[in-house]
Image (spheres, grey):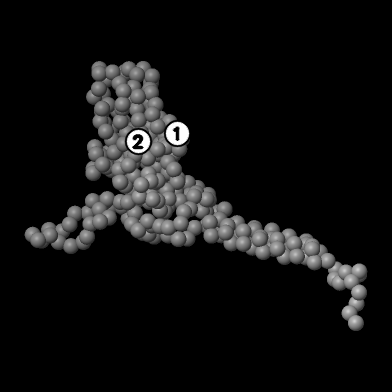
Amino acid sequence: MRITRVLGAALLALGLAAGPAAADSSPSPSASADGDAPTRAGSSFRTATEIEQGQRATASGSTGDYLYWSFPADTGQRPTVRATVKLPATHGSETWQLDVYDGLRRRQACQYGAQTRTAAQGAGSVELACVLRTVRGWSEPWANDPLPGTYYLRLTVVDLAAADLGQPVSAEVRVESKDVGGAAAVDGSLGKPLVPGIAATSGEDKDGTKTAVLSSFGRDDGWSSGWWSDRWVWTGIGAVLAALAGIGGYVLTRGSGRPSRVPPNG
């Protein structure tokens, strides 16, 4: 009976503690696209069009153009970037590529996804995708780990016939994230998110003009980088289970009392 009660308490503790952690690992809700969705793209990192996760952005351009967008990503998120390029009615074979850069403009590798694709002659469109690594709260200075802050998308054609250069195309991009949670958590936190203008100070220059702000990205609830993650919940679960296992082992091995072969005192 004692062992049954111990196991029952362990299962109850596991169920109660795992509930919030399981909820944290579910995909984050996507923001609905509204009438203010961007309809153009930038031509460089500095002019990249800002989009929010879950927002559908479109742009028109020509083959040979570089199209840039930027979006925010926070700790524990695993962003997925998708792009669709609609091609002209007549064209030769074309190869398109989607690159993702972090706030330091370091190119980030894709875990999986068709980052580069070739559209056959006469194809109506080409679709690209890139699933990034999980954004970490902290990293070594020499590492290339994704950190919270601004990320840049660059969409361009990398191989085509000279006769197709300059033909009109239209592009559509969308970014969504899955909240991975404590499974990818690390100790430590980033002092500031890697966003443009993070080092700019408010104030006025000598001639009275105000300092320009390079990015309008902001988080109403703040960036989540910090010491807390649901990894602490699982650490607590492990401690409780270890304690219950110790109690169960003691109950099993202590016996029923004084051994019969030991003579009584006196």
Horizontal and vertical percent position of residue 84 = 38, 32
The structure residue drawn at horizontal position 42% and vertical position 48%, both measured from the top left corner, is 135
Mark earlier in primary sequence (2, 1): 2
Q: Quadrant of the C terminus?
A: bottom right
* Amino acid tagged 1: Gly
User: Can you name the residue that lies furthest to the bottom here?
Assistant: 266
Q: Is residue 197 above or below residue 3?
A: above
Q: Secondary structure at mark 1?
A: loop
Q: How many labels, in total?
A: 2
User: Can you name the residue that lies furthest to the left here?
Assistant: 207
In the picture provided, is 258 more to the left or to the right than 80?
right
Horizontal and vertical percent position of residue 249 = 75, 62
Q: Secondary structure at mark 2?
A: strand
Q: Which residue is mark 2?
A: 99
The structure residue drawn at horizontal position 25% and vertical position 30%, both measured from the top left corner, is 65
Horizontal and vertical percent position of residue 72 = 36, 49
Q: Is residue 262 above or below residue 185?
A: below
Depth check, front residue: 42 or 204: 204
* Amino acid tagged 2: Asp
The structure residue drawn at horizontal position 28% and vertical position 35%, both measured from the top left corner, is 67
Local packing at callout 2 (Cα closer than 10 Å; few below 14, some 14-19, many 20+) is some
The structure residue drawn at horizontal position 42% and vertical position 34%, both measured from the top left corner, is 129
Whether residue 172 is visible: no
Place residue 56 in its image quadrant.
top left
Rendered image: mark on residue 70: none
In the picture provided, is 205 more to the left or to the right than 87?
left
Depth check, front residue: 23 or 201: 201
Q: Which residue is mark 1?
A: 113
Local packing at callout 1 (Cα closer than 10 Å; few below 14, some 14-19, many 20+) is some
Whether residue 112 is visible: yes
Place residue 20 in its image quadrant.
bottom right
